[in-house]
Image: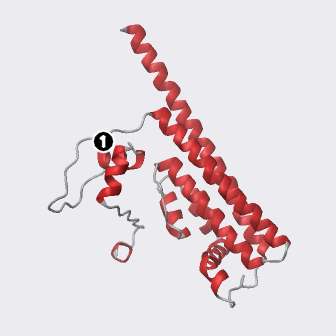
Amino acid sequence: FANQQYAEGKVVVHAHGAAALKQNIAQSNHYFAAVLNQGQLLYSANGVLCLEEVTTPRPEKRLAQAQLHWKHRGKMAQGFLAAAERALEEDHETVCLFLLHQVIEQACIGLIWVFMGYKSDMHNLRRLLYVCACFSKKPMQHFTGTPENEIMLSIIMKSYSEARYRESFSLENRSAYNFLELVERFMELAEELCKEKFEAMEAALSVEKEQVEEEVTNG
């Protein structure tokens, strides 16, 4: 509905129940704390509580969590990528594409957690890329920067179900190596984006530490 009514951009809706909201608030989740502290309330119904300011995670904890999460998701993505290469070597092209879907999915989920602190459970690659666009245009541009890349993304998306359940699924006269190269370059991009984010977070920690030490000295 939102996308039909608002053609100037894309609207991504994250819906969560009260239990999930309370759990993430109790855990000082970065994403939920930022939404509740900085977001603008557009609608409220009876029974919806107006919350006080939510505690945000300490910067050093946030950095450690982001690094740990990317280590896990990045390892998963690299494992799927290695499996895709092996499948291609053994002439299993449709299996290769299904595995490449998993690579992109895991990488996007990892990026979203690193930059936003949000744990995504979506499988739709285009929606994941839209969420990534909230902090960087590069992931989306990688797959939609040219008509050919966008077509290959669509075929990879179809492979999630059709590679398993439809004998008619095909690569549409394209080399599987082109798909593999596209996803390999995306993994390189994801690694670089996370590296830059971690460096920025570490720099911010250093600045904060220096400010605290200066206040103690001056005090």
Residue drawn at point x = 50 percent, y = 29 percent: 205
Q: Is residue 88 above or below residue 58?
A: below
Residue drawn at point x = 39 percent, y = 66 percent: 11
Q: Nearer the viewer, residue 88 or 25?
A: 25
Q: Residues within 10 Å of mark 1 (few under 14, many from 20)?
A: some
- Residue 18 spot, x, y in % from top left: 29, 58
Q: Residue furthest bottom?
A: 168
The quadrant in which the C terminus is found is top left
Q: Residue furthest left?
A: 46
- Residue 215 spot, x, y in % from top left: 39, 14
Quarter of the image for residue 160 reads bottom right
Left or right of residue 54, residue 115 in this image: right
Left or right of residue 82, residue 201 in this image: left
| Residue under numbered circle 1 | 54
Residue drawn at point x = 54 percent, y = 44 percent: 66
Q: Can residue 193 be seen in the rendering of this structure?
A: no
Per the image, label 1 sits on a secondary structure element best described as loop
Residue drawn at point x = 33 percent, y = 75 percent: 5
- Residue 65 spot, x, y in % from top left: 52, 42
Left or right of residue 174, residue 189 in this image: left
The quadrant in which the N terminus is found is bottom left
Q: Can residue 127 be seen in the rendering of this structure?
A: yes
Amino acid type assigned to the residue bearing label 1 in the image: Val
Total marks drawn? Answer: 1
